[in-house]
Image (tube, grey):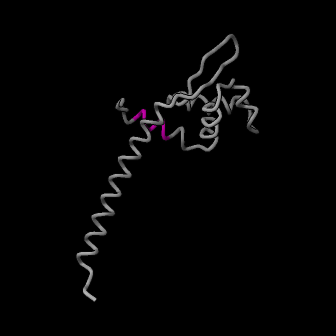
Amino acid sequence: MVKYETQELDNIFHALAHATRRDIILQVAQQEMTVNDIANHYDMSLPAVSKHIKVLMKAGLVIQKREGRVRHCRMDYQPLEAASDVIQKYKAFWEDQFDALEAFLEETEPNS
């Protein structure tokens, strides 16, 4: 597994923090789409959608290729795997903490 630097992870989580960008990811995960096709799904300007796509590209979640004047977007799953790894580490940490708390509370519980 590729180790990601803090800035790369920050970019991934920043990109995922916005509902429109999460929705764009879901769309391009199903099929490659042009920027115009993506923009047609939203009640916002083409430049606004393009800004969202640029954030996703900076995070590595969307790859864009040009064919003449048309830009095609597709999903790259690898950054999501890195984010998932980080989330799993936090989940394991907190599960251990809660298990330790539960054991402590059981040990200190007064006898009834």
Q: Position of residue 51 (x, y in %)?
A: 62, 31
* Residue 43 image offset from top left, x and y in percent: 76, 39
Q: Which residue is drawn at the image coordinates 66% and 19% (left, top)? A: 71
| Residue for point 31% across, 60% down | 97
Residue drawn 59% across the image and 21% down it: 64
Identify the residue at the far left of this view. Answer: 107
Q: Of helix, strand and loop, which mostly describes the magenta segment?
A: helix
Q: Using the image as rendered, state which of residue 22 and residue 103 is in the foreground.
A: 103
- Give residue 16's quadrant in the image: top right
Specify the quadrant that holds the N terminus.
top left
Q: Position of 107 compared to 72: left or right?
A: left
Q: Which residues are magenta?
A: 7-13
**Horizontal placement of 109 versus 80: left or right?**
left
Task: Indicate the position of residue 67 as horizontal and vertical percent values.
Answer: 66, 12
Q: Is residue 11 magenta?
A: yes
Q: Residue at x 28, y 74 (%)?
A: 105
Query: Residue 95 at x, y = what percent?
Result: 35, 58
Name the residue at the bottom extreme: 112
Quadrant location of the C terminus in the rendered image: bottom left
Q: Compared with residue 23, is residue 108 higher up or lower down, i.e. above or below?
A: below
- Picture layout, residue 68 above or below residue 96: above
